[in-house]
Image (cartoon, helix red, strand yellow):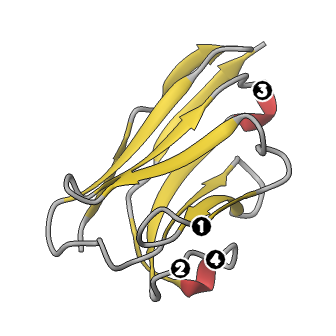
Amino acid sequence: VQLQASGGGLVQTGGSLKLSCANSRRTISNNGMGWFRQAPGKEREFVAHISWNGGVTSYAGSVKGRFTISRDNAKSTVYLQMNSLNPEDTAVYYCAAARSSYGSSDYTQYAYWGQGTQVTVSS
C-alpha cells in the first residue's frame, strides 16, 4: 500500500478544499480509511474515518457538519471534502489505511500512512 495525499493549499476563512488520498499499489477496498491532522506544536488529531464500503463514517466533533469523508473503491481513492474552513483547521492532513475493515479514531489502528498535505486557512 502506498498512499498519496493531495489537494491541500491556502484558502480563506469560509472556503472549501477537497483532499484526495490515492493508493498506487495493493487495493485498499477492504480497509477502513481515516484522515488525521497535525498542527505545529500539537499532537496528531483524528478528523474522520470511513468503513471499507463507505457504509459507516465518523467525525471529530470539531469538523462534524463541515467535513465529509467518502471513498471510491474503483479508483482506490478516499476523499475529504472540507467546507466552512477556519484558521483552526490549519494543519498537515494525513490519510491512513486501517488494519481492519472499519476505521478508528485511534491512530494506532492504522497500518499505512500517506505523506501528508498542508492545509492553511487564512483569517
Q: Position of residue 86 (x, y in %)?
A: 77, 25
Q: In front: 99, or 88?
A: 99
Quadrant location, the C terminus: top right
In this view, the mark in front (1 or 3): 1
Q: Residue at x 64, y 15 (%)?
A: 15
In this view, the mark in front (1 or 2): 1
Q: Residue at x 38, y 43 (%)?
A: 20
Instruction: Please give the label number shown on residue 47.
Output: none
Per the model, the C-alpha gap separating discs 2 and 3 is: 30 Å
Label 4: which secondary element: loop
Spot the residue most to the right.
61
Among the two numbered marks 3 and 4 on one chain, the one whose residue lies closer to the N terminus: 3
Q: Amino acid at mark 2?
A: Tyr
Q: Amino acid at mark 1?
A: Val
Residue behind mark 3: 87
Q: Are marks 1 and 4 in contact (CB under 8 Å)?
A: no
Among the two numbered marks 1 and 4 on one chain, the one whose residue lies closer to the N terminus: 1
Residue behind mark 2: 102
Among the two numbered marks 2 and 3 on one chain, the one whose residue lies closer to the N terminus: 3
Q: Amino acid at mark 3?
A: Pro
Q: Residue at x 45, y 67 (%)?
A: 96
Q: Are marks 2 and 4 in contact (CB under 8 Å)?
A: yes
In this view, the mark in front (2 or 3): 2
